[in-house]
Amino acid sequence: MSPKDLVDRWLQDHQRGRLSRRELLRRLSLLSLSVPTIGTLLACARTTESPTAPSGATPAAPTAPGEGRTPAAGTIPEYIDRSKLDKELHFYNWSDYIDPAILTEFQDTYGVKVTMDTYASNEDLLAKLQGGASGYDVIVPSDYMVSIMINLRMLEPLDYSVIKTIANIDPENLKPYYDPDNTYSVPYMWGTSGYSYDTSALGDDLSSWKELFEPRPEVRKKVVMLDDQREVIGAALMYLGYEINETSDEALAKVKALLLAQKPYVLAYSSQNNDDLLVAGEALIAHIWTGDALLSAQEKPSLRYIIPVEGCTVWQDNLCVPKTAPHKYTAMAFIDFLNRPDIAGRNANYIMYGSPNKAAGAQGFIDQAMLQNPAVYPPPEVWKRLQWIKDVGEEGTLKHDRLWTEVKTA
Ligand code: N2P
């Protein structure tokens, strides 16, 4: 079967509901098609999907001055100097973390070819950059990784004469602890790291991390943990009653014992396939990020995402420009584009994460179902049990690295 026939068949399967959007995307990316080709294919696929755009064709007027920088689709804002735009941009992003049609739209509008590579953890991103990868223009580190990269002088100050759409970001999400003046980072998406489980197999009342760390017999070998050292160590620390940035030898010894005892029951440590394993029924419980949890629940409605009673991490991922970026001005223009309310809203609906873009919500670009979903936007009483991962310094990081290696290689 030719690649074109294969793609046609996948599109048909997708339109008939036999292939998820996520799986379609994954298969298309394996074919090494260019971003615009994938975008076009997905756009075709979408025309027959139920619309994700907000109901009511005309978005409401902006609610406050400063909110509402929404240039007409297909135009470059007047404050962007076109003569400074390069022909290409390299984007290094988490996997499944942008609607590919948005990349196509940027490419078509700005005449910039976007190439995207993906990573699965903050530590992978850091290692890649420290290993000498100098071609990336825009990266998406989480909160604590922004702190680490600022300290290592790896980030370029952002140019707010270009990123004017910063005005669309909720002040609540700006001036974060890790970059108090947003000198180096603009919030992209945020979420939590709880777990999803199959209610059809396990009932409705699971609530503790115990279900993963000391699983009941029917769940053994059906547990998936994120492949992420700060997330897994953090969850174990919380389960044991510590705070997630604890680095004392005593606490970490207990974490190690817990993770080693859990390991025989773990089917996989995976941040990219945890949702697929749940949907396929190979896993019954998985440590997971909000958006991946919601996307998999669309495919398998018996899946439920919870924030455990002991609490879990909350994080905010950010658009940043490495000091080594070859196309810095274009990187700033791309970040400006991603913060347009219509673009940010479409993106949040597609990847199903919490959006810091207040204007996108106010102008009706984020689905009501998302805005009202307590799994995406937790109520105040749940917020009380959320904790931010912080940079634990060189010594703390070394201890975490060692612990994680010991668990993974055991
Ligand atoms: C989405 C990646 C989420 C990022 N697959 C978690 N910080």
Image: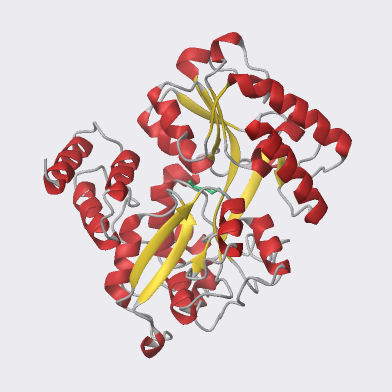
Hey, which residue is sitting farthest top in the picture? 217
Q: Give the side of residue 354 with respect to residue 247, left or right.
A: left
Q: Quadrant of the C terminus?
A: top right
**Would residue 234 be visible to someone looking at this image?**
no
From the viewer's perspective, tell me whether residue 80 is left or right of residue 408.
left
Q: Nearer the viewer, residue 126 or 9?
A: 126
Q: How is the image coloured?
A: secondary structure
Q: Front-most of 253 and 390?
A: 253
Q: Indicate left or right for 31 with 210 as reference.
A: left
The structure residue drawn at horizontal position 34% and vertical position 79%, both measured from the top left corner, is 87
* Position of 64 relative to 127 (above/below): below
Picture coordinates of residue 185, whole percent (x, y)? 60, 68
**Residue 344 sits above or below residue 368 on the image:** below
x and y percentages locating residue 402 in the rendered image: 74, 42
Viewer-nearest residue: 303 or 340: 303
Residue 46 placement (x, y as % from top left): 24, 48
Q: Residue at x 83, y 43 (%)?
A: 247
**Is 57 rendered above or below residue 240?**
below
Residue 309 shows in the view: yes
Q: Residue at x 41, y 38 (%)?
A: 295
In which quadrant is the N terminus drawn?
A: top left
The image position of residue 112, as x and y in percent, is: 33, 75
